[in-house]
Amino acid sequence: MKLSILMPVYNEEERIADALKQALAVDYPCEIELVVVDDGSRDGTREVLGRSDDARVRVITHPRNAGKGAAIRTAVDNAEGEYMVILDADLEYDPQDITKLLEPVLDGRATVVYGNRTFGSHSAYSFWYVMGNKAVTTAANVLFNSYIGDLETCFKLMPVALYRSLDVRSRGFGMEAEVTGKLLRRKIRPYEVPISYRARGREEGKKITWKDGVEALLILSRERTRRRGITPGKR
């Protein structure tokens, strides 16, 4: 099995070198590639990426910022692996945990695996951030009669072909809710494993806001009520 690690990047000049180093240093149980999409960064991110000489790294550049969902779509279109996992470049997630996500897949216990974050005083960005995450996750559980623990987690591992079939249209952070809503609509319940997490603050460049939480709720409602066979944006 080959795993495509998809890394969307936007204005991460200070962190991208460490993010690449950490991701490539993991002892993975399978072949990997790291597909990095520079989503129109306006700082020195592109120059740092240009210095990478690891054969496992492929860099694709958007001419202008299009959002996380759009960056992931580009990465998925260019992925060569059978499986994929998303890894943000902000150093909030530990790439060593990707091996935990792979275990139930390699053992044949699961097809889709989510990394479930445990929030604590040392790892959470703020009280309202955690409550917002719990509210969105609870809404998904109520709407789809499921019991997932962390909808907004970045660590979503699944077959590349499955992600492509979901036809994710959200260009920003709403892609997290759209992916989960479409999986749950298909009765695909993610297998969850605990992962470590350390949220950064606004002063460190955190980009998600309460508006993204509202958008997530709207997307979940749309996916729950959408008639079968109808793809948003298509007639």
Image (spheres, rainbow, N blue to C red):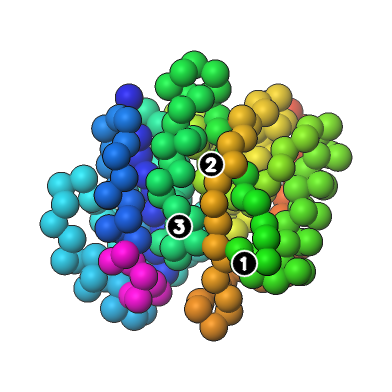
User: Residue 205: x percent and y percent?
Assistant: 51, 77
Q: Nearer the viewer, residue 60 or 2?
A: 2
Q: Is residue 160 visible?
A: no
Residue at (66%, 36%) from the top-left corner? Answer: 182
- The residue lying toward the viewer, choosing from 63 and 11, is 11
Comes first in the chain, label 2 or label 1: 1
Q: CA distance from mark 3 to mark 1?
A: 20 Å
Residue at the spot of label 1: 122
Q: Secondary structure at mark 1?
A: loop
Could you classify mark 2 by the number of other residues whose Cα lies within 10 Å: few (under 14), some (14-19), or many (20 or more)?
A: many
Residue segment shown in magenta:
11-18
Q: In the displayed structure, does residue 147 sit left or right of residue 109?
A: right
Q: Residue at x 41, y 58 (%)?
A: 8
Helix, strand or loop at mark 2: strand
Tell me the amino acid under the disc marked 2: Lys
**Relative horizontal placement of residue 119, taking residue 66 as reference (left or right):** right
The residue where tag 3 is placed is: 88
Location of residue 10 with respect to 161 vertically, above or below: below
Looking at the rendered image, the quarter that the N terminus falls into is top left
Is 100 displayed left or right of 229 in the figure? Answer: left
Which sits earlier in the primary sequence, circle 3 or circle 1?
A: 3
Q: Nearer the viewer, mark 3 or mark 1?
A: 1
Q: Pointer 2: what residue?
A: 156
The answer for how far apart the CA atoms under marks 2 and 1 are is 23 Å
Q: Is residue 66 magenta?
A: no
Pick the front one: 168 or 97: 97
Q: Calculate the distance from the C-alpha at mark 3 to the C-alpha at mark 2.
A: 11 Å
Residue under the point 29% across and 78% down: 44
